[in-house]
Amino acid sequence: MPYPEQHPGPPVVHYPVPLHTAPGAPLATVAPTGLSAVQSVQLPDGRIVTGYTLTPAPPTPARTVGSVPAWAKTTALLAPTVGGGTAAAGIGLSYAAPGLIAMSHALWSAAALVVAAVIAVPVLLRTARRATSGGSDGPGTTTHITQNITATGLFGRANGTINHH
């Protein structure tokens, strides 16, 4: 037994023993089984190995060094357009700013006029009615109209009188 200060010897590792076959000996294929992805192969030493067969994936087309992806081309073409549109919008807003300010002032004035009209018109009508309804025989007298209408039967002719007082 080694001392604790000493390093133990190399660990013993058991690897599977490789099977040496004759070079150039082709692998023999045995008749396929019922499954399409399973195939039995006879090795040169006589053993039969059964396993899943892998269908080779189609090779991906290699991109040449100088080619540019389509998304990069699209982005490169759209970038100046978006930037130019943003710049044009900023310039347009800077030219339109005085007009927009004047328009907002005009809208506030119109809103104030509407509010004033809603409040002032009923007040003016009320004061005008009080001024016209004075005493009897004065300028504030009102006219009363009465109607008396009579008709006989469903389709009878109507007769009526209108009285002004």
Image: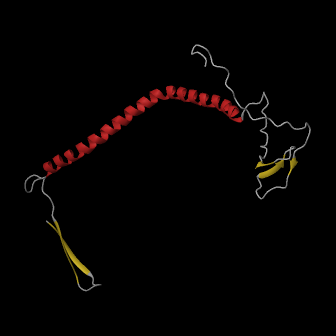
Q: Is residue 35 left or right of residue 8?
A: right
Q: Quadrant of the C terminus?
A: bottom left
Q: Is residue 73 left or right of residue 110?
A: right
As drawn, the residue found furthest toward the top would be 5
Q: Is residue 139 visible?
A: no
Q: Position of residue 73 (x, y in %)?
A: 70, 32
Which sits in the foreground, 146 or 115? 115
Q: Is residue 123 left or right of residue 83?
A: left
Q: Position of residue 161 (x, y in %)?
A: 19, 74
Task: Count the marks.
Answer: 0
Q: Is residue 78 visible?
A: yes
As drawn, the residue found furthest toward the right would be 24
Seen in the picture, residue 129 relative to 13 is either above or below; the reply is below
Q: Position of residue 97 (x, y in %)?
A: 46, 27
Q: Quadrant of the N terminus?
A: top right
Residue 88: quarter of image: top right
Instruction: Determine the residue positioned at 22% across, 47% down.
Output: 122
Instruction: Determine the residue positioned at 37% across, 32% down.
Output: 105
Instruction: Determine the residue positioned at 34% across, 35% down.
Output: 109
Q: Position of residue 90 (x, y in %)?
A: 53, 27
Residue 16: quarter of image: top right
